[in-house]
Image (cartoon, rainbow, N blue to C red):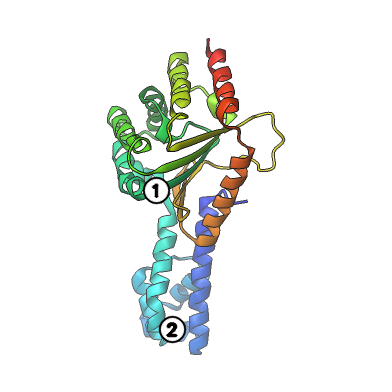
């Protein structure tokens, strides 16, 4: 199962980097004290970095490699360090200026992606949200996180971003849990409109929308919602952070998980029946 904790994934990346730095020191045949002297910092700092208790800066890594006569290894280690930094980005930092900027920040990624794989267990995917549904969702997020109130602007930005499902040569394979159809964001009118919109987008040639029935015997358990971009990057969003995954083995786990979700979902008339049933409950 793909790890659900972004902090544990970052911790693993940090430990791997620390382990590599330790190997470089040992290969050079020097002690942590001698390394510290060459780098002009304390022995305690060497120990903290080597035991993954302190994240090194790019300059720390360059100094470490230089002290060990391994300058040629520095670029790759710096890149790994930066990858670890970008894997876990606190929502407070991303959203400090409100939600509109966050919607706009992903537009270049969305435009260059040709094949999207999307799994959602909790909300309708952003691509498919109506303005009313998006307003209810983003208003709840802004209130929970005490963010600046730019919900109206954020909704317009999200709606503009969603035009790609009707434009260009993008393809969308989307799977949602049946519970998504039942979780009420907004009033009955908003939910009815959102569910009706799902029925209409199912007719789009670029969109494949599947629903996993709640009463089937599962071969793949529900996991966190995620989006795969051209099988090369995965984004998922737990409560406290935004996580970007680019390591091929981890991306592969999500691609495999999506394949399992896809096989469990129903499509066409069966999916429509589930959506229509959810609309009936609203009236």
Give the x, y percent position of residue 177. Answer: 58, 33
Please, what secondary structure does the residue beneath circle 2 have? helix
Report the side of 91 relative to 151 (left or right).
right
Q: Select label 1 or label 2 by which is in front.
A: 1
- Closer to the camera, 9 or 121? 121
Residue 94 visible in the displayed image: yes
Numbered tag placed on residue 33 in the rendering: none
Instruction: Tell me the crowding category of disc 1: few under 14, some 14 to 19, or many 20 or more residues within 10 angstroms, Cα based.
Output: some
Give the x, y percent position of residue 242. Answer: 43, 47
Residue 96 visible in the displayed image: no
The residue under the point 52% across, 55% down is 251
Instruction: Tell me the crowding category of disc 2: few under 14, some 14 to 19, or many 20 or more residues within 10 angstroms, Cα based.
Output: many
Give the x, y percent position of residue 279. Answer: 53, 16
Please, what secondary structure does the residue beneath circle 1 have? loop
- Closer to the camera, 198 or 105? 198
Q: CA distance from mark 1 to mark 2?
A: 48 Å
**Furthest residue in direction front, as rendered:** 205
The residue under the point 48% across, 82% down is 24
The residue under the point 34% across, 41% down is 95
Numbered tag placed on residue 114 in the rendering: 1
Above or below, comparing residue 165 to residue 71 in the picture: above
Residue 214, image quadrant: top right
Report the side of 158 relative to 246 (left or right).
left
Report the side of 246 relative to 167 (left or right).
right
Give the x, y percent position of residue 169. Answer: 36, 44
Mark 1 or 2 closer to N-term? 2
The residue under the point 52% across, 85% down is 26
**Furthest residue in direction top, as rendered:** 283
- Closer to the camera, 100 or 241? 100
Numbered tag placed on residue 35 in the rendering: 2
- Closer to the camera, 60 or 10? 10
């Amino acid at each position: 199962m793909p790890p659900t904790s972004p902090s544990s994934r970052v911790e693993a990346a940090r430990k791997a980097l620390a382990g590599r730095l330790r190997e470089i020191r040992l290969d050079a045949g020097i002690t942590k004290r001698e390394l510290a002297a060459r780098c002009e910092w304390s022995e305690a700092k060497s120990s903290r970095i080597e035991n993954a208790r302190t994240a090194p800066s790019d300059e720390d890594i360059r100094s470490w490699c230089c002290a060990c006569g391994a300058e040629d290894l520095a670029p790759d280690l710096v890149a790994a360090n930066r990858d670890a930094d970008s894997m876990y980005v606190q929502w407070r930092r991303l959203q400090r200026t409100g939600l509109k900027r966050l919607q706009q920040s992903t537009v270049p990624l969305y435009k260059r992606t040709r094949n999207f794989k999307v799994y959602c267990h909790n909300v309708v995917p952003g691509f498919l949200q109506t303005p009313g549904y998006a307003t209810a969702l983003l208003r709840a997020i802004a209130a929970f996180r005490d963010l600046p109130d730019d919900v109206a602007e954020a909704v317009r930005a999200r709606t503009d971003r969603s035009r790609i499902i009707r434009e260009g040569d993008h393809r969308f394979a989307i799977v949602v849990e049946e519970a998504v159809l039942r979780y009420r964001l907004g009033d009955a009118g908003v939910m009815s409109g959102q569910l009706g919109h799902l029925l209409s987008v199912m007719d789009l040639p670029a969109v494949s929308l599947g629903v996993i029935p709640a009463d089937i015997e599962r071969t793949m358990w529900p996991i966190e919602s995620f989006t795969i971009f051209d099988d090369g990057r995965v984004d998922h969003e737990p409560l406290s952070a935004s996580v970007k995954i680019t390591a091929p083995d981890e991306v592969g786990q999500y691609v495999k998980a999506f394949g399992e979700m896809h096989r469990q979902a129903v499509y066409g008339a069966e999916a429509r029946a589930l959506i229509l049933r959810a609309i009936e409950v609203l009236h």
